[in-house]
Image (spheres, rainbow, N blue to C red):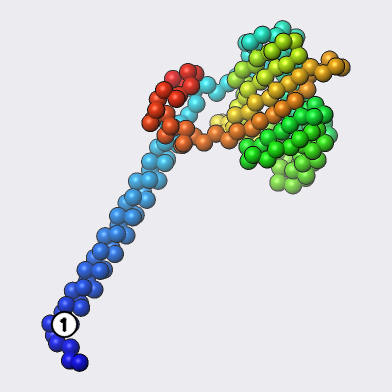
């Protein structure tokens, strides 16, 4: 079969068009990627929280409870934090009730003091070795004389305390028969600042009162 000059020109034209299309798609993809990256950065940088909490637990104005109760509850959380900072699993576990539950930001759920203590023993000798805890306090609420819920912002760190804390944490504490306040339940949630910012942009009514 004889290939004419016209056929050759047609093939060359088709190849040239394909190259042009491929280049255009590449440029478009790159532009979209850069736009998305810029948008993500903007969303992340504009998602700071206003309600960052207070540094000292005892300075919270509690909803219910006495000043002595607040002091005791804050003392338990301080003991827990100090135990983590020493990477002391036994002392850490001792601040929880025997049947405490503990849910991490990954969704891992521990049941009972022994379970969470042994898990932290492994963590403190592994990838959490040498880490410390940072927190700020959002609120404390008392229900009856023996139950308290404390909400904090928190994070772990190695050397330098982070300026922004990436997790929101809920402690449920109970006063046990020996008079000591211990943590009966702990729940840790990783904040997703970009998704949070997007949800507020699409529906501003979902923004918490403290963030308006």
> From where the camera sits, is residue 59 visible?
no
Above or below 83: residue 4: below
Q: Where residue 87 sits: x, y (%)?
A: 77, 37
Find the residue positioned furthest to the right: 178
Q: Is residue 120 left or right of residue 209?
A: right
Q: Which residue is mark 1?
A: 7
Residue shown at the point (43%, 32%) measured from the top left: 199
Which of 101 and 194 lies nearest the eye of the viewer? 101
Give the crowd class for mark 1: few <14, some 14-19, many >=20 residues within 10 Å. few
Which of 159 and 74 lies nearest the eye of the viewer? 74
Above or below 22: residue 150: above
Find the residue positioned furthest to the left: 6
Q: Where residue 145 sits: x, y (%)?
A: 75, 10
Above or below 144: residue 161: below
Q: Quadrant of residue 180?
A: top right
Residue shown at the point (78%, 22%) measured from the top left: 182
Q: Dot 1: what SS?
A: helix
Residue shown at the point (60%, 20%) measured from the top left: 138
Above or below 95: residue 209: above
Residue shown at the point (20%, 77%) measured from the top left: 12
Find the residue positioned furthest to the bottom: 1
Q: Where residue 122 sits: x, y (%)?
A: 78, 44
Q: Quadrant of the C terminus?
A: top left
Q: Quadrant of the N terminus?
A: bottom left
> From where the camera sits, is residue 177 visible?
yes
């Amino acid at each position: 079969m004889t290939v004419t000059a016209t056929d050759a020109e047609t093939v060359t034209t088709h190849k040239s068009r394909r190259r042009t299309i491929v280049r255009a798609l590449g440029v478009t993809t790159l532009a979209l990627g850069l736009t998305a990256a810029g948008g993500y950065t903007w969303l992340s940088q504009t998602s700071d929280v206003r309600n960052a909490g207070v540094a000292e637990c005892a300075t919270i104005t509690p909803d219910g409870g006495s000043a002595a109760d607040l002091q005791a509850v804050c003392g338990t959380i301080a003991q827990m934090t100090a135990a983590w900072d020493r990477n002391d699993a036994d002392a850490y576990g001792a601040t929880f009730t025997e049947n405490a539950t503990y849910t991490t930001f990954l969704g891992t759920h521990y049941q009972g003091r022994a379970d969470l203590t042994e898990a932290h023993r492994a963590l403190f000798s592994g990838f959490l070795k040498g880490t410390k805890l940072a927190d700020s306090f959002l609120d404390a609420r008392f229900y009856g004389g023996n139950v308290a819920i404390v909400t904090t912002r928190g994070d772990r760190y190695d050397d330098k305390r982070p300026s922004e804390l990436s997790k929101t944490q809920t402690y449920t504490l109970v006063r046990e028969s020996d008079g000591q306040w211990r943590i009966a339940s702990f729940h840790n949630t990783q904040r997703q600042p970009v998704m949070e910012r997007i949800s507020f942009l699409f529906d501003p009514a979902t923004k918490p009162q403290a963030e308006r």
